[in-house]
Each structure stands twice: as C-alpha cells, then as structure tokens.
Image: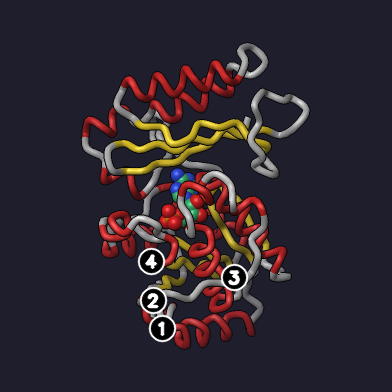
Amino acid sequence: MFIFHHINDLTAYLEERKRNGASVGFVPTMGALHEGHLSLIDTARSLTDVVVCSIFVNPTQFNNPADLENYPQTIDQDVYKLELRKCDVLFLPSVKEMYPDGVEERIAVNLGPVAEKLEGSFRPGHFRGMATIVDKLLAVVRPDSLFMGQKDYQQSLVVKELLNRTGSKVLLHVVATRREPDGLAMSSRNMRLTDGERQQANLIYQCLVSIQAQAGIKPFGIVQKECAELLEKKGIKPEYILLCDAASLDILDEYDEGRPMIALIAVFLGEIRLIDNLVL
Ligand code: AMP
C-alpha cells in the first residue's frame, strides 16, 4: 500500500493510474479503523480498480473540543488492517495540508434542509465541517465512486445533497452498518466506553429493533417513551429517539406504512455520544 501525506504526491500517483484507465474508489475515514470501515474498503475493492482510503481527524466537524481531543488514534494498527484488506492507497494528510488557510474555512454550498435536522441541530456546524472536508478530499482524489456507511445515515444524505448541488459526477455507495455480535453498531468511539457502558450499549440497537417490531402494533409515541425509559433506567441518556421519513428525515409522529421510514437514535453513555439507525 502506498502512503501519501501530501496532496501533490497523491494526485501525481492517481493521475498516472487514471491515464491507464483505472477507476478510483474512495473511502474517507477518521481512522481507529474497525470492520465497519473495512467493509467499505471491501466494497470499494470489489467495484473499483484503485482503492483510496483517507484517515484525517477533521477538526472542523467537531462541535465538542473534548471529543476532538480524545478522538482515538491508532495509526499503526490502521495501516496494518488496510494492508490486509488490500487497500491500494492511504492518504494521511496533516491539518495544514488540508486547511492551508486555517481551520476557519467552510464550504459555501447550501446543504439544504436535511443538514438542519437531527444531528444538524444537536451538533451545530458539524455537517458544514464534514461537507467542507469531503468536498476538499473529493477535489484531491477525484474518484469515480465514494463509499460511506449507513451508520451515519444523515451524513450520507447530506453528502448526496452536496454532490447534487455541486454538480458532481461521483457515484455515492451507501454500505450497510456493521454490528458487534450483540447488535451494537461498530464505531471508533466504542473503544472509549468503560466495560460497564459497553455492556449496556447494545440497548441502543434493541430499541431500534423494538421500534421496527412495534410498527402497526403500538402507537409510536408509546414505543418512543418505553425506549427512553429503558435507556434511562440503565444510565444511558437519550438525546433523540425518532421515527422519520427515510428520504427527507421529516419527523413522523406516527408509523406511516405508506412511506419509507427510518428510526434514529442518539444517546450519551457518560461522555461518549453514540448514534445508530434502522431502516424500517
Ligand atoms: P468515521 O471514521 O467515523 O468518519 O467513518 C468513516 C466512514 O465509515 C463513514 O462513511 C461511516 O459512515 C462509515 N462507518 C462507520 N461505522 C460504520 C459501521 N459500523 N458500518 C459501516 N460503515 C461505518
């Protein structure tokens, strides 16, 4: 695997490969790689000739400085895992490389209403920061396909909006969420949970499954209340437990079998904020 720290080295390599007809698949990450990230690499591997992964802990998408400060960094293990999965290229830029004019820079594109909801309102500035770095990375890698996880469902909708609004031809592939055996969605932040928190964390998925199972049986308001009580009893603080239209993320007060629905949950376990979702 080639490892590049500088934009010009990466683009020189990729230009050469593209000239020879290779298609490029891109998997942007913030590192501390787990099987969820690696399933994106596998999918990219199966669909494109050159697989590029980036690891960059993007400061502009963190609305909580402590979260940025404590974000796990496991670069040696990450390189090892990527090599095992036959990733071709790792792009590992510095903050200066990506933000030469300083981290105040933000993309000016209107990200549409989907970026204002849920994560957009609980984490002000998060999506603009995320879109800023995705746009910058896409301008550098210029891939044919971009691979992102359904784990961050709203993020994938915002990126879809970004691609549409910038007239990008990049194909977005949204890859299914990888879970631990007990159902907890894999996340880099899971490694910061205490043993006790980790044991309770699968309740997030259990709530999502019960929201799905109760469709057409119980009113959503009751299921939502039961889930909140179950989580709170175990010391997990729900930030939101919502049923939404899967396309627009408009909040639904009640199950509506006539449209695609998604259940989304955000919680705090101690200091750690986790999100998950399930398409119904
Ligand atoms: P992150 O490093 O958290 O920014 O995630 C990088 C990419 O991996 C994003 O597109 C995420 O949606 C995706 N991802 C994170 N966790 C999972 C998971 N458990 N299953 C599938 N994709 C994931």
User: Residue sitting at 58 percent across and 84 percent down?
Assistant: 15
Q: Amino acid at mark 3?
A: Val
Q: Earlier in the sequence, mark 3 or mark 2?
A: 3
Tag 1's secondary structure? loop
The answer to whether one can see residue 38 in this image is no
Ligand 1 contact, mark 4 (Cβ < 8 Å): no
Amino acid type at mark 4: Pro
Residue shown at 35% from the left, 38% from the top? 268
- Tag 2's secondary structure? loop
Q: Does label 2 point to a residue whose CB lies under 8 Å from ligand 1?
A: no
Label located before the other in sequence (2 or 1): 1
Q: Mark 4 highlights which residue?
A: 59
For marks 3 and 4 on the same chain, the one whose residue lies earlier in the sequence: 3
Q: Is residue 125 above or below residue 14?
A: above
Write the residue at 73% across / 70% down: 167
Q: Is residue 213 visible?
A: yes
Quadrant where the C terminus sits is: top right
Q: Which residue is mark 3?
A: 24
Q: Which mark is residue 93?
A: 2
Q: Which residue is mark 1?
A: 6
The 10 Å Cα crowd at callout 2, few under 14, some 14 to 19, many 20 or more, is some
For the residue pair 7 and 40, the one nearer the viewer reads as 7
Kindly indicate the quadrant of the structure image that contains residue 61: bottom left
Q: Does 48 sit above or below residue 276?
A: below
